[in-house]
Image: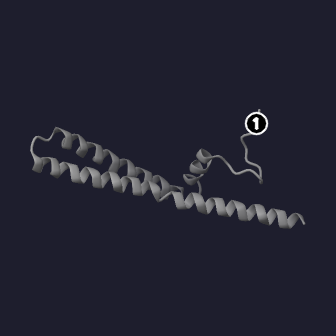
Amino acid sequence: MMDRESTPEQEPGYFRQIAELFRGELGWVSWLLMAAQLILFAASLYAACRFFQATDVLEALRWGLPSATLLIIATLTKLTLWPSLQANRIIREVKRLEELLAQR
């Protein structure tokens, strides 16, 4: 059976890296972003439902454009966490290199 703990040579799995974003000193920022993303997505779904129920072109535009805009903003909000993943990867790699240099 494989050990799920990461070794200095092995990078943690993707889901473990995501879970690390919600811990620590700035974990509350990630939670706040995800809450905002969830609210935006729910509002987008509501507007999309109203869009598909519309019988008039003007009413369809009134609900369709906000739905698309909210969905795009919700996606962009979620994507703001990806640079943090990359920064954490770089920090882990620098620490690994420091350990290798300290061993020499």
> Outermost residue, top direction?
1
Q: Residue at x 66, y 63 (%)?
A: 90
Q: Is residue 27 left or right of residue 58?
A: right
1 is higher (above) or lower (below) than 60: above
Q: Residue at x 54, y 61 (%)?
A: 83
Q: Position of residue 7 (x, y in %)?
A: 77, 49
Give the amino acid at mark 1. Met
Q: Is residue 35 left or right of residue 103?
A: left
Q: Position of residue 34 (x, y in %)?
A: 44, 51
Which quadrant is the C terminus positioned in? bottom right
Residue neighbourhood size for the residue with mark 1, other residues' Cα within 10 Å, grouped as few (<14), some (14–19), many (≥20): few
Q: Residue at x 9, y 44 (%)?
A: 56
Q: Quick one: 23 or 4, which is closer to the camera?
A: 4
Question: Which residue position holds label 1?
Answer: 2
Q: Residue at x 61, y 50 (%)?
A: 17
Q: Position of residue 73 (x, y in %)?
A: 35, 56
Q: Position of residue 80 (x, y in %)?
A: 47, 59
Q: Quick one: 27 or 71, which is closer to the camera?
A: 71
